Image (cartoon, rainbow, N blue to C red):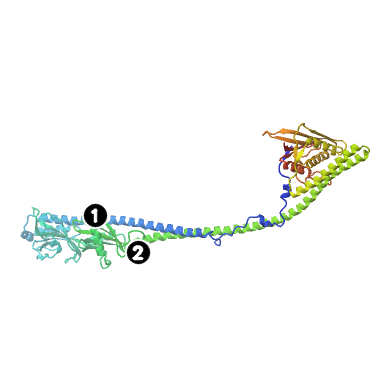
Amino acid sequence: MTVSLAEPARAALEGAVTPVGRRASDRLPAPPEPPGFTSPGTFWPLCVAVVVLPLLAAAVAAWLSWQDLQADTESRLTRTVDLLHENTLRSLESQEAYLTAVNRFIMDRTWPEISASADVADFLARLRDSAPGTSAIGIISPDGMLLHISSRAFPMQPVDRSQRDYFQAHQGARVDDVRPAVGAAITGRVRGRRIFPVSHPRRGREGRPDGGVIWATSDVDAFANFYASIVISPSDTIQLIRQDGRILVRHPAAPEAPEEAGAHEDKMAIIATSARTGRVALAYVGAGNSGAGLPAFGANRLVAARWLDRYGVAVIYGLHMDEMRRIWGRRAAGYAAAAVVVVALLLSLIRLAQIGMRREYVALARARAETVRRLEAEIRLHETARITALGQITAGVAHDMNNLIQSVMAASRLIDRRAQEPEKVRSLALMMRETAARGARIASRMLDFGRQQPMREEPVELQAAFERLQETVGGLLGSGIRLVCEAEPDLPPLRADGAEFETVLVNLVINARDAMPDGGEVRVTAGLQRAEDGAARLRVTVADAGTGMTPEVLRQASEPFFTTKGSGRGTGLGLSMARQFAENLGGSLAIESTLGQGTRVTLSFPA
């Protein structure tokens, strides 16, 4: 099993240290501002929008509703006036047909014969009985005397009608003037009912008028009853009016619904418009006209009129605006109520969101306070851990120094044994001096490690380093354990701190020795290897044939202060410092181990 270790060992200590005097709260982002209406610009624009926009939408809907209602009302009013026009036209044409029938009946008779004829009186009576809506039919002589009337018995005393407008309308009539005349409304003497006459000049076979007049009266109540049946609302008015402004028929009657001041002139103008166009003319009459936009509450009526040119009369309908305003008011109130409901719901949602944000803010504030408390506790714990780590580092340094002391003691024993051999003594003294210098460099390196200073680099010949390793620890490994150091020829030097490199090798060899309680061979080898990208790397391997490690132990082997040795035998810093040394040079450390078959620790460096 192989483990590649590429993370810095120093992080174990650095992550556990917080600068002195720095508060835990300084490591957290600043707390958010509390949400709600107290924060400028947080909710006010939204509140204004949810109030203004629905009300504006309701106003637009009300305006469009008024436009639709106005268009619908005008269309309905136009159809109603067209119906009134057709009804009036049929009634007047029927009256004209009766007059034509009378004219044919008396066409060949002289006026004395007509006055003395009982057949004429009987014909008028029978014709009136067969003509619904006709009150009476009469004949007036050229001198203005009423000779016959269908409602009186024959013979009758002639009555002067020369001053009646419908008689005077035909005096001096031209041959080509064939239009009938409509007289003013009057109250009949016989029945006491309101009527208005339709007259036609009496003509001979040549079609020439001779001054006589044939007339028929229409019952005003018949027209009024029809008007009452088609009226849109009870407050509306319908009128049949002559060109001179005289009203023939009105619904409702004048005492119950007097005309507005100034309305007469307005209606005559509307009638004139209809006479010019031949279609229904519409206009708003009364104080404060309205024709577009929202309704003008001073406007009294929407008036529609249509002119009957042949008879010189017009039908005119006055729709009271109050009914339109009531309908529109109900619609607008509905829109306003809907807008108010929408505004209330949106404001409620905003309020709920505000409450939720306040709760979330409180929860975040509590969480932040809890985080600060935990950070402060962690800082205190890290300070304690730092002190513990320093003690363990001290123990590790003592371990390394102990190895150097053993080397010095071994050299001193050899000097004592070979005191008579100056050359050998000088060689041993040189070795002791180098060992002491290495110890000094180890202490300095540990200080550098604590101060985070970069290591010193120098060319290190691997073959020479292996020879010094052999001399230093070769005889200190104990019986049954042999150290073998091999390096490929012509290897490039390693740029590193030589003392620290030798210390790393010593620690790895000592670890290998401790892993072989029954003895064996520790092999230290060096070679050059090409990576897949073509780059050359120096590889230094320390291998033993010891007990090996389980996968669980292998995963933690290079962690600082992790050791499986008994108390007082190891600090757990050997592999950690070896990994840190390799990574500081841009390299890595890999461990291969199989339980019962030994361990291989490989240091890889850029060549």
- From the viewer's perspective, tell me whether residue 341 is left or right of residue 603: left
Q: How far apart are marks 1 and 2 (CA)?
A: 30 Å
In the displayed image of the protein, which residue is found farthest to the top?
Answer: 489
- Which residue in the protein does label 2 denote? 297
Task: Give residue 287's position: percent from left, percent from top.
Answer: 31, 65
Decide which of 410, 283 is in the foreground and name it.
410
User: Which quadrant does the C terminus fall into?
Assistant: top right
The answer to whether residue 97 is seen in the rendering is yes
Mark 1–mark 2 CB contact (< 8 Å)? no
- From the viewer's perspective, tell me whether residue 547 is left or right of residue 127: right
Decide which of 101, 10 is in the foreground and name it.
10
The answer to whether residue 517 is seen in the rendering is no
- Which residue in the protein does label 1 denote? 277
Task: Give residue 345's position: percent from left, percent from top.
Answer: 50, 58
In the displayed image of the protein, which residue is found farthest to the bottom?
Answer: 255
> Image quarter for residue 367?
bottom right
Task: Give residue 583's position: percent from left, percent from top.
Answer: 72, 42
Q: Which amino acid does label 1 sit on?
A: Thr
Determine whether the residue tagged by mark 2 lies in a helix, strand or loop: loop
Say which residue appears at 76% left-offset and 49% top-offset: 450
Say which residue appears at 65% left-offset and 55% top-offset: 28
Q: What residue type is labelled 2?
A: Phe
Determine whether the residue tagged by mark 1 lies in a helix, strand or loop: helix
Reply above or below: 549 against 151. above
